[in-house]
Image (cartoon, helix red, strand yellow):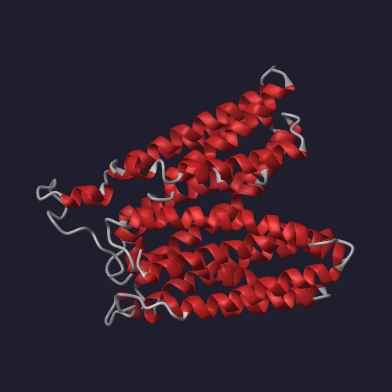
Amino acid sequence: MGAAMRRIHVGNALSAFGLGFTVPFLYVYVAQVRGLGSMTAGIVLAVFAVAALVVLPFAGRAIVRRGPLPVLLTALLTASLGALSLGLANSATTVLLSAAALGAGQAVMQPALATMIVDCSSADTRSRAFATQFFLQNLGLGVGGLIGGHIVDTSRASSFTLLFSIEAAMFLLLVVIMSTVRLPHAPKVEGAPQAKGGSWKQLLGNRAMVQLSVLGFVLFFACYGQFESGLSAYGVEAAGISTSALGTAMAANTAMIVVAQFAVLKFVERRKRSRVIAAVGLIWAVAWLTAGYAGLGHGSQTMATAAFISTYALFGLGESMLSPTIAPLVADLAPSGMAGQYNSAFALVKQLALAVGPAVGGPMGASLHGPYIVTFLLFSLGITYLAIRLGRQLTPVQNQPSLAKSRVVARGGAPTEPVRAGA
């Protein structure tokens, strides 16, 4: 990695650290510490998703026009202001406005950082770069939650003020660090189609990107959208999982990612991306079958708990295979200069899935145990089908970048030059 990429990875780790540092404690902070009630706390959590959905459609155009670095710095300053004001807020109005600023800032950070990774990598190094990003994001989330949990004290509002102040200071530190990044490519492309307002039309005309977006929605809806909602509710209600076992399951997911991420990287880099995603669908189908045994089987409580923990571990294995696959594919599908638009569009799809997933899965997981398992088992098999279908829309090099190293490539790919996006 060059100096620019190292700084970008620091940015990824610290932004994830900030998310894990405060978000798990938002509900308790708003509802109990500030005494604003559970309804206001629920609205605050919804504001994070709404803020992301509002700003992401504009973030892509801003990244393409201004470059990812200025957009990232603006997002960091916005998030810092939101974090600081949230720690000082004591009314519903100020809490909601602060949460909107923090949520919007954090939402824009991800496509901006992803576009910087595209600018600082080649087709040969992009998969490893995004795998490193995913690894550091999970590490940041875990460490942030661990440290934040030891700082907060529900009997002292000042401990939460300290928590949010540290987060705000961290974002400002990140502004200083990222200001030193020198991207190897010019961030602004003169005469790009989006400058005339046609960027979204051009994106929607890319059949491969549209299919990848549909596939991405199903991926995030059937996995990430269920972790802390439907699947946890199902585990407690159907399988009798204790809160400590639920925490162990979440830890097993993170541990699997940490252990497997770089172990599977070489395997993934040598395979067609569409087949890797299809394999993830099958792995997650096994995960849902295991969850079904945990809640609907007739084994002992120990077996049910073990099966439930294994479910989260299997999801982690699939995640580690997706991280060096999906994000680089988004970049490779983007025309030159459009990586920011494509990254933001895919981030918008992710936010939609994360908003809809808990709303659908939560009630089903809590009360409709059998239908819940069957529904998401079918969604996982749908991932496999959609991945195979997507493979037909990709050029050989887009589907398997390692082919670019060969001088003879199947028709539709480049014989010697790797596919480059955002250059």
Q: In the displayed structure, would residue 210 be above or below residue 112? A: above
Give percent across and percent down for residue 163: 74, 68
Relative placement, left or right, of 314 versus 266 is right
Considering depth in this image, is 417 or 159 the residue closer to the camera?
A: 159
Give percent across and percent down for residue 185: 29, 75
Q: Residue at x 25, y 51 (%)?
A: 401
Q: Residue at x 9, y 47 (%)?
A: 408
Relative placement, left or right, of 300 versus 71 is right
Considering depth in this image, is 90 or 19 the residue closer to the camera?
A: 19
Give percent across and percent down for residue 193: 30, 75
Residue 82 appears anywhere in the view: yes
Considering depth in this image, is 260 or 240 the residue closer to the camera?
A: 260
Residue 394 appears anywhere in the view: no
Q: In the displayed structure, would residue 165 be above or below residue 33? A: below
Give percent across and percent down for residue 305: 69, 28
- The image quarter containing residue 321 is top left
Q: How many numbered marks appear?
A: 0
Q: In the displayed structure, would residue 264 be above or below residue 54? A: above
Residue extending farthest top:
298
Which quadrant of the figure contains the C terminus?
bottom left
Q: Residue at x 50, y 31 (%)?
A: 285
- The image quarter containing residue 369 is top right
Which quadrant of the figure contains the N terminus?
bottom left
Relative placement, left or right, of 100 versus 269 is right
Relative placement, left or right, of 122 versus 258 is left
